Image: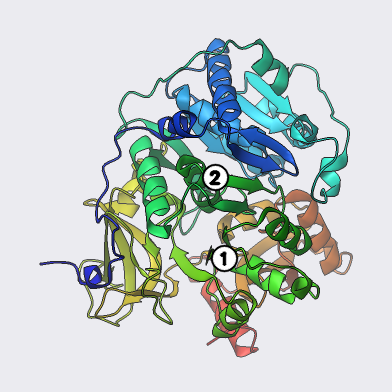
Amino acid sequence: MEEKWYSSWPPGIPRFLKPEKSLPEYLRDNITSTPDKVALSFYGYDMTYRELDEAVDKFAVALANLGVKRGDRVALFMENCPQFVISYFGTLRAGGIVVALNPMFKHAELEYELNDSEAETLVALDFLYPEVEKVKDRVKLKNVILTAFRDYLPSSPTLPLPPIMDQLKVTFPETLDFLELLHKSPLRAIRKIADLKEDIALLQYTGGTTGLPKGAMITHHTLAHNTIGSMLWWGYTKDDVHLDTLPIFHIMGMVQSMCTPLCRGGYTVVLSRFSPEVVAQAIMQYKCTVWVTTTTSIIALLEWPNIHKYDLSSLRIVCYGGAPISTATLAKLKQLLPKATFGEGYGLSEICSTAVLTPLHRPKDGFIGIPFIGTDLKIVDLETGLKEVNPNEEGEIILKGAIVMKGYWNKPQETRETLKEGWLYTGDIGKMDEEGYVSMVGRKKELIKCSGYSVFPTEVEGLLHKHPAVAEVSVIGVPDAYRGETIKAFIVLKPQYKGKIEKEEIVDWAKENMAAYKRPRMVEFREALPKSSVGKILRRVLVEEEKGKGNMAV
């Protein structure tokens, strides 16, 4: 029997895809068709497809000369910049596995993911290297390649630079220089990918629904499938000008704002950081036609008082995700961009970004969309996870198909708990109507979503435990109109610190020791935390208490 969502399937879009080559080879195709077209524009520095492809080949050869073999992990520790793109595709061509690290990471977070992935090669921006230095004696790095924003900035930038980008380049001993490495590397086509369905392209770190981050193993086949599928779904053309404001270390930005535009042969305007002012200037100046972003960024743009001074009429497609968008916000967005088409998406790292997308020809209010190309989706009961529920009933979203990861890196138990008979159990609660449209209800477990990022309470709690004053801690998410959710920490202080430390000191400490999106902005001191009979802290009791105070939706 045909799946119910095919009655709303977008015209001209295939139901299944069978990629025949890897992503770097799709990128190479643009050399034949449009070699001198600009692929990336970085604050006025323009790189053509020919220049990009040659840099990717040179970097792949350089990695091979450094001893990187097929299956070796190469960690990228950078904000959005051309060097990230070159390193990413170069690693894939060399047969390596990309480990995209969050550039907001502090040393403890960095140490964990470097050791878990066993990466021996790191490419980083120079100003981030001090965090690496703090852990270099506790990780297995053999090659550290450093670059600076200035390496790929024009003498007269066309858009305002964030302050961090306007700094002099810094060098460190016992590291390699990115530009020097490319200059010395011979130009030679290289391809060391043997099996699209078996070879791993990415270790994309995620906490799933609980615990320490896990590396989702994404194959070359899945990466190519979701990239080409997204390109077809949204109807991108070679004439599109894409605005990239999403962080490309994150799976959403990586696939939707980097891989998809470049493999389509489009023109991509890359920004290192989001700013409403710079976004508005970029759209107007470059006549951007496509913007994939987060709900948080849309809210920030709409609330910026000068937004109506800019001509944003070139935008034809705006896609968003990361958090639900309110009816009022969407109405304001449509008023600002009356000629644009809007699409929403649902995804996670374990399925390489995309599982449900809006059919642009037939969106439906209150629903994200329908299952993506090559995707089977069920809503199953929360008790057993085996019985498919009736239309419009709540249950756990489970997924199957070409989009699903191979498993978690070196974590067989967690893999078995998440992948069952080919089905990925997401931990997210949703509903599906009679036509196959999917809506989100909540999360089965205690994952917190802040500004589109996944935050895992146990990881934040582990980091807070490093503060000398903290005896016990529990973390929850509370609703936030801007971020979606904000993190609140409940802390029991050690006796010697009671009355001697302020909440603001904990918040300031977290600011120095955690990525911005995961640090608590609210702290409450408690004499004790609610616990079960076996001493387990009951996070759900804290959630219920916050609801009772009116701080959380009931």
Q: Using a 10 Å C-alpha cutoff, classify the residue at mark 1 as few (fewer than 14 neighbours), some (14 to 19) or many (20 or more).
A: many
Question: Up-down: is 526 above or below 459?
Answer: below
The residue that mark 1 highlights is 449
Quick check: can you spot residue 177? no
Query: What secondary structure is marked by label 1?
Result: strand
Colour scheme of this structure image? rainbow
Q: Residue at x 60, y 27 (%)?
A: 51
Q: Residue at x 45, y 56 (%)?
A: 348
Q: Nearer the viewer, residue 228 or 68?
A: 228
**Residue extending farthest left:** 1
**Residue 431: x percent and y percent?**
34, 77
Quick check: can you spot residue 470? yes
Q: Nearer the viewer, residue 159 or 56?
A: 159
Question: Up-down: is 146 above or below 339?
Answer: above
Q: Nearer the viewer, mark 1 or mark 2?
A: 2
Q: CA distance from mark 1 to mark 2?
A: 23 Å
Q: Residue at x 56, y 13 (%)?
A: 187
The residue that mark 2 highlights is 258
Question: Up-down: is 394 above or below 182?
Answer: below
Amino acid at the residue labelled 1:
Lys
Q: Nearer the viewer, residue 7 or 239?
A: 239
Q: Earlier in the sequence, mark 1 or mark 2?
A: 2
Residue 389, by quadrant, is bottom left
**Residue 113: x percent and y percent?**
57, 38
